[in-house]
Amino acid sequence: MTFEKIMVTGASGQIGSELVPFLSEVFGKERIIPSDVRPNSTDPRFIALDVTDRTSVDRAMDKYKIDTVFHLAAILSANGEKNPELAYKVNISGMYNILESAVRNKVKLVLTPSSIGVFGPDTPKENVPIETIARPVTMYGITKLLAEHLGNYYHARFGLNARGLRFPGLISYKTAPGGGTTDYSIEMIIEAAKGKNYKCFLRENSKLPMMYMPDALDSLLKLAEAEDSRLKHRTDFNVASFSVTPKELETELKKYFPRFQATYEPDFRQSIADSWPGSLDASAAVTEWDFHPNYNLRATVEDMIIHLKTSK
């Protein structure tokens, strides 16, 4: 599959701000059209785009002759609980508008990240397969599950090449956390690197699947480029690199910062974390498009610290 004009929605967010330069290196800057409701004034390629405005989405796809969309615009889990109406509007109306416009403009591929948020308290806690009980208890999870089904529907009904994967918590040193329940991992590493202690908003034994951003970017590209004939699934691939508790992350950080201390004072995000599984079965992604993460917990922390030190 060839990609000539790639639009990235939500390009100013945690994933988008790193995906845009990543795709620019792979395909060339001239092929990438970053978009966000908050455009980046330092990048002349950026366009202002509100995905909840169908007319604007249609106009952008037509004007720039878009053939590929990485649809990242979304309200994340913790922020979604603070403003569920906005989460529904962005995550569902925005997804619907992207899919409708993609069909109308004969777009080749729409790739949308989903999340472990689609799982709920009734989901098995370990080695969770793709096909399982999915009864999310957050607005974020509900919208992401519906978005998966919408993608499958548009593939079956209109032949749209819709694809997606369920990201675990994502760790990155480049972009500030964006309102997710797993943001504690980024915050804890950053505070330790600053020589400060950290008050964690989850319990110390809250085990969750995680992934370092370089692996996340690589997985998006691999899924986008995968041969369609190999795909038995489409919008709901499980991916994860490792699972970790806050206490285990604290212990790993103490290898570099022996005086570092974390305290644990759970807030409303604890109930969200409690509804999610501790590990995922990513075998379908391995089999169908060669998913292979390169960073475990040790490698992630080490690389984060190296980059945080050099960026001071």
Image (cartoon, helix red, strand yellow):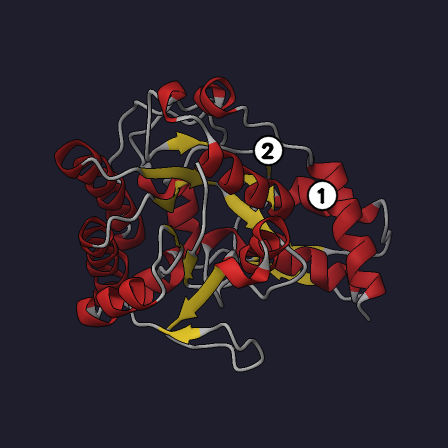
Q: Nearer the viewer, residue 284 or 141?
A: 284
Residue at image mark 2: 241
Q: Are marks 1 and 2 in contact (CB under 8 Å)?
A: yes
Q: Give the image quarter of residue 183.
A: bottom right
Q: Nearer the viewer, residue 279 or 72?
A: 72
Q: Residues within 10 Å of mark 2 (few under 14, many from 20)?
A: many
Q: Position of residue 45 (x, y in %)?
A: 50, 72
Q: Which mark is residue 98?
A: none
Q: Amino acid at mark 1?
A: Thr
Determine the secondary structure under disc 1: helix
Q: Give the image quarter of residue 228.
A: top left
Q: Label 1 to label 2, Cα distance in Å?
A: 10 Å
Q: Amino acid at mark 2?
A: Ser
Task: Say if 50 sits above or below 197 in the image.
Answer: below
Horizontal arrangement in the rendering, residue 42 relative to residue 253 (left or right): left
Q: Can residue 208 be seen in this snapshot?
A: no
Horizontal arrangement in the rendering, residue 158 relative to residue 187 (left or right): left
Label located before the other in sequence (1 or 2): 2
Task: Say if 79 sits above or below 274 in the image.
Answer: below
Q: Position of residue 72 (x, y in %)?
A: 40, 56
Q: Position of residue 211 (x, y in %)?
A: 58, 41
Q: Can residue 164 be seen in this snapshot?
A: yes
The C terminus: image quadrant: bottom right
The residue sitting at 40% across, 30% down in the picture is: 237
- The residue most toward the left is 157
Determine the secondary structure under disc 2: loop
Q: Nearer the viewer, residue 176 or 259?
A: 176
The residue sitting at 24% across, 39% down in the picture is: 160
Residue at image mark 1: 300
Q: Give the image quarter of residue 82.
A: bottom left
The residue sitting at 21% across, 64% down in the picture is: 89
Q: Residues within 10 Å of mark 1 (few under 14, many from 20)?
A: some
